[in-house]
Image: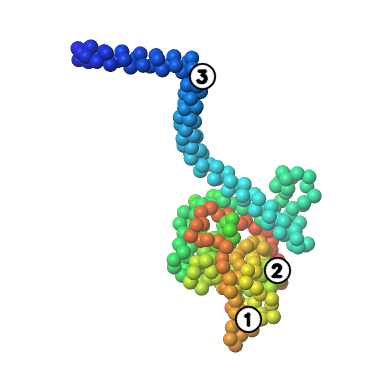
């Protein structure tokens, strides 16, 4: 206490000077319009900057929740797109009616395909046999042989499921074969990855008489019970005629960038078992 009193006595002139300066400043701002406006503009800038910083921190805190919301919304929109693609082929499905008056009625209709969200927690692209690990499992309704896609295109197929996790074989796996077609003319073949660039695959079994051009879109054929028809796969980046063969050698640039795969959708084909049983009877 004595030290504090000595300090105040020693510097009391300095404190008095600062006090009088503060009073003079307040009076100048209070009774002078120009200085008042300048002061308010300065204080608004400082407070606005602080509020922006605080809001940025809050927004970052809500970012993960917002990502989940957007992923869920994206999945529902993809489901509608899948249903629309199916209705372009009469007799294939009657799972959804576009005579509904509202979007909610459409959303509540019976869907031939539904989508589940998952996050990729492990992914490889540098070996000849690549796989992905997903953070959803049997408790979330995930099953073996379900297709995996993202907002760019095809990702892979679920091959193993535990209670809380699933493993999918990546399209970047030399064991993976995908029935695909040229969108403009519906000629289909088998797409596979040759183990080279993670951005390119090869489409085989397209005969010479088919019109093929660089830039042609490649999509799923719909001939499997895993992927619906017309899901994007890639675009033709080059093609040539094989010597001694009746088929093209077509290189496809994949739309999916496997080095940036983060969130995916897992396809549940609700009529899959019925289709398989029917096809086995043929």
Considering the image in quadrants, where does the N terminus appear? top left
Considering the image in quadrants, where does the C terminus appear? bottom right
Q: Earlier in the sequence, mark 2 or mark 1?
A: 2
State the residue in front, 231 or 48.
48
Please name the residue shown 46% across and 35% down the image: 53
On screen, 22 above or below 78? above
Q: Secondary structure at mark 1?
A: loop
* Residue neighbourhood size for the residue with mark 3, other residues' Cα within 10 Å, grouped as few (<14), some (14–19), many (≥20): few
Please name the residue shown 58% across and 74% down the image: 238
Alpha carbon distance from label 2 to label 3: 72 Å
227 to the left or right of 123: right
Q: Residue furthest bottom?
A: 244
112 to the left or right of 158: right
* Residue neighbourhood size for the residue with mark 1, other residues' Cα within 10 Å, grouped as few (<14), some (14–19), many (≥20): some
**Which residue position holds label 1?**
247
**Which residue position holds label 2?**
184
Q: Position of residue 173 (x, y in %)?
A: 50, 68
Report the number of numbered marks. 3
Alpha carbon distance from label 3 to label 1: 85 Å
State the residue in front, 47 or 61.
47
State the residue in front, 38 or 54.
38
Q: Nearer the viewer, mark 2 or mark 1?
A: 2
Q: Position of residue 131 (x, y in %)?
A: 48, 62
Please tell me in which quadrant of the rendered image residue 103 appears: top right
Q: Earlier in the sequence, mark 2 or mark 3?
A: 3
Look at the image and tell me whether residue 96 can be seen.
yes
* Residue neighbourhood size for the residue with mark 2, other residues' Cα within 10 Å, grouped as few (<14), some (14–19), many (≥20): few
- What mark, if any, has residue 33 been given in the picture? 3
């Amino acid at each position: 206490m004595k030290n504090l009193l000595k300090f105040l006595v020693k510097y009391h002139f300095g404190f008095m000077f600062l006090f009088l300066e503060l009073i003079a400043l307040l009076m100048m701002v209070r009774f002078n319009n120009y200085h008042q406006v300048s002061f308010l503009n300065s204080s608004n800038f400082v407070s606005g900057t602080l509020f922006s910083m605080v809001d940025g921190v809050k927004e970052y805190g809500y970012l993960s929740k917002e990502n989940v919301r957007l992923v869920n919304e994206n999945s529902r929109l993809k489901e509608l797109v899948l249903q629309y693609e199916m209705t372009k082929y009469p007799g294939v499905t009657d799972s959804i009616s576009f005579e509904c008056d509202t979007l909610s009625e459409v959303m509540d209709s019976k869907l031939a395909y539904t989508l589940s969200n998952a996050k990729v927690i492990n992914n490889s692209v540098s070996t000849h046999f690549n796989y992905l690990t997903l953070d959803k499992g049997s408790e979330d309704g995930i099953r073996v042989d379900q297709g995996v896609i993202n907002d760019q295109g095809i990702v892979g197929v679920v091959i193993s499921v535990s209670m809380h996790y699933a493993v999918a074989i990546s399209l970047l796996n030399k064991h993976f074969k995908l029935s695909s077609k040229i969108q403009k003319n519906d000629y289909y073949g088998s797409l596979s990855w040759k183990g080279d660039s993670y951005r390119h695959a090869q489409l085989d079994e397209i005969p010479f008489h088919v019109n093929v051009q660089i830039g042609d879109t490649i999509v799923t054929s719909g001939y499997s019970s895993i992927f619906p028809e017309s899901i994007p796969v890639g675009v033709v980046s080059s093609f040539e005629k094989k010597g001694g063969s009746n088929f093209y050698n077509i290189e496809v640039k994949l739309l999916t960038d496997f080095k940036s795969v983060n969130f995916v959708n897992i396809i549940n084909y609700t009529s899959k078992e019925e289709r398989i049983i029917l096809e086995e009877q043929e």
